Image (cartoon, grey):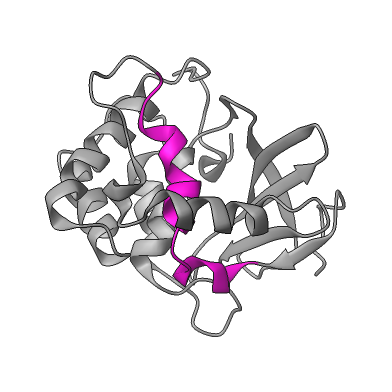
């Protein structure tokens, strides 16, 4: 796979992995807490068990194949999430794509902590809710929202955010009994991210 504007590694389409048991725990579990919460996050919050998570992690973090998750948008820029599986330098890269999908530019990365330019809640929802049916990538709105959720250290969250994230988690297989708890932990961790600078402008605003 080739992504114009990103030349770092052996990229492969990863969208089929979204349906595999253990994916959402691998993608989101580390974001649910940083030791400040009394309740320890567990894979069962996402409908997974430890064996599922371990088995899929071998696929997701393979240095020979870097999974790519494309989130094309019908209106405005879309996003791309890349598992950057360099040996001894693992991380995740987040890219914005041109409206026509012809070019991508990296706006953020995650190596134990998030750094880069973030999106507002409304911008995140716009990307999630407007898939491009003719483009290759993730079409399901719940999965789209959760894939790009790390781009949201927005300190002024909409009141609807916790319920929307909980509904997305339920849609991808999280138990209803734990979806709200997982959503609260995810949003709490994102909004206390140490790399957020409220003076940064959104990349979608031309900043």
Which residue is found at the position 37% from the left and 53% from the top?
49
Quarter where residue 176 is shown: bottom left
Residue at the extreme left of the image, as rendered: 177
Residue at the extreme bottom of the image, as rendered: 134
Left/right placement of residue 56 relative to residue 190 reads: right
Which residue is found at the position 40% from the left and 48% from the top?
123
Along the line of sight, which residue is nearer the eye, 172 or 57?
57
Quarter where residue 40 is shown: top left
Which residue is found at the position 78% from the left and 61% from the top?
11
Q: In this view, does 131 lie above or below 122?
A: below
Left/right placement of residue 88 relative to residue 43 reads: right
Q: Give the range drawn in magenta.
A: 14-34
Along the line of sight, which residue is nearer the eye, 45 or 105?
45
Q: Position of residue 63 (x, y in %)?
A: 80, 50
Q: Which quadrant, please, contains the C terminus?
A: top right
Which residue is found at the position 36% from the left and 56% from the top?
48
Along the line of sight, which residue is nearer the eye, 40 or 124?
40
Q: Where is residue 118 in the image (x, y as percent from the top left)?
A: 50, 34
Q: In this view, does 29 lie above or below 56?
A: above
Q: Position of residue 125 (x, y in %)?
A: 35, 54
Residue 140 painted magenta = no
Residue 21 painted magenta = yes
Left/right placement of residue 132 relative to residue 165 reads: right
Is residue 172 visible in the rendered structure shown here?
yes
Along the line of sight, which residue is nearer the eye, 202 or 142?
142
Is residue 119 visible in the rendered structure shown here?
no
Residue at the extreme front of the image, as rendered: 51
Q: Which quadrant, please, contains the N terminus?
A: bottom right
């Amino acid at each position: 796979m080739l992504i114009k504007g990103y030349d770092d590694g052996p990229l492969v389409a990863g969208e089929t992995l979204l349906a595999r048991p253990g994916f959402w725990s691998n993608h989101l579990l580390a974001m649910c807490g940083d030791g400040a919460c009394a309740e320890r996050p567990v894979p069962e919050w996402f409908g997974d068990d430890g064996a599922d998570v371990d088995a899929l992690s071998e696929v997701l973090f393979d240095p020979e194949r870097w999974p790519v998750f494309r989130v094309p948008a019908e209106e405005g820029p879309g996003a791309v999430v890349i598992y950057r599986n360099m040996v001894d330098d693992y991380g995740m890269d987040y890219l914005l794509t041109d409206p026509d999908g012809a070019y991508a530019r990296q706006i953020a990365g995650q190596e134990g902590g998030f750094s880069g330019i973030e999106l507002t809640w409304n911008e995140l929802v716009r990307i999630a809710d407007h898939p491009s049916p003719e483009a290759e990538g993730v079409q399901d709105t719940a999965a789209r929202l959760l894939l790009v959720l790390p781009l949201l250290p927005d300190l002024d969250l909409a009141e609807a955010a916790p319920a929307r994230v909980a509904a997305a988690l339920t849609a991808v297989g999280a138990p209803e009994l734990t979806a709200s708890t997982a959503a609260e932990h995810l949003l709490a961790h994102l909004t206390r991210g140490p790399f957020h600078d409220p003076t940064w402008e959104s990349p979608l605003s031309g900043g």
